[in-house]
Image: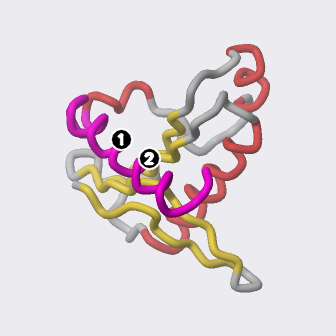
């Protein structure tokens, strides 16, 4: 289920962060967070998504929900770099085995394009 886009997370000193897309998967009983990046994968994107996943696990999900899943969609990635970035990370930052349960390809592409177009007109990416 689509929950929203640009979902705000406020931490410590009133610093705001925004998750690009948030879904709730009824089959998995899990929140699915998607972060859209218009450039190649960088290690700091994984840290940012890990923060979002930890926040949702601590503050949003209830006792009956499974762990939150984080997905980063970007223009490209370097496999060796990602091997080191993701090594030892216990959160589900990438979940290729669960992609079967997220919205179908056309719906996801449409929503990603809509958000990207909206962001291009509202702020710098």
Q: Nearer the viewer, residue 119 or 67?
A: 119
Quadrant of res 77: top right
Magenta segment's dominant SS is helix
Numbered marks: total: 2
Residue at position x 38%, y 57% in the image: 22
Q: Residue 59: image x %, image y %? A: 51, 74
Find numbered disc 2 in the image and state the secondary structure of the residue it sits on: helix
Q: Is residue 65 above or below residue 93?
A: below
Where's residue 5, x and y in %?
Answer: 39, 61
Answer with left or right where residue 115 lies relative to residue 50.
left
The verdict on residue 121 being magenta is: yes
Residue located beneath label 2 in the image? 116
Colour scheme of the picture: secondary structure
CA gap, disc 1 and disc 2: 5 Å
Give the number of the disc on residue 113. 1
Q: Secondary structure at mark 1?
A: helix
**Left or right of 48: which side holds 120?**
left
Q: Which residues are magenta?
A: 101-125
Q: Are marks 1 and 2 in contact (CB under 8 Å)?
A: yes
- The residue lying furthest to the bottom in this view is 14
Q: Is residue 32 above or below residue 90?
A: below
Residue 73 forms part of the magenta stretch: no
User: Where the N terminus falls, by quadrant?
Assistant: bottom left
């Amino acid at each position: 289920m689509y929950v929203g886009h640009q979902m705000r997370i406020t931490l410590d000193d009133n610093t705001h962060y925004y998750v690009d897309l948030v879904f709730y998967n009824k089959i998995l009983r899990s929140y699915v967070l998607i972060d859209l990046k218009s450039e190649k994968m960088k290690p700091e994107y994984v840290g940012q998504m890990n923060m979002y996943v930890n926040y949702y696990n601590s503050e949003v999900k209830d006792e009956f929900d499974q762990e939150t899943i984080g997905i980063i969609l970007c223009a490209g990635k370097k496999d060796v770099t990602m091997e080191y970035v993701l090594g030892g990370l216990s959160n589900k930052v990438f979940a290729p085995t669960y992609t079967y349960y997220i919205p179908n390809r056309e719906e996801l592409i449409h929503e990603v394009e809509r958000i990207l177009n909206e962001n291009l007109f509202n702020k710098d990416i």
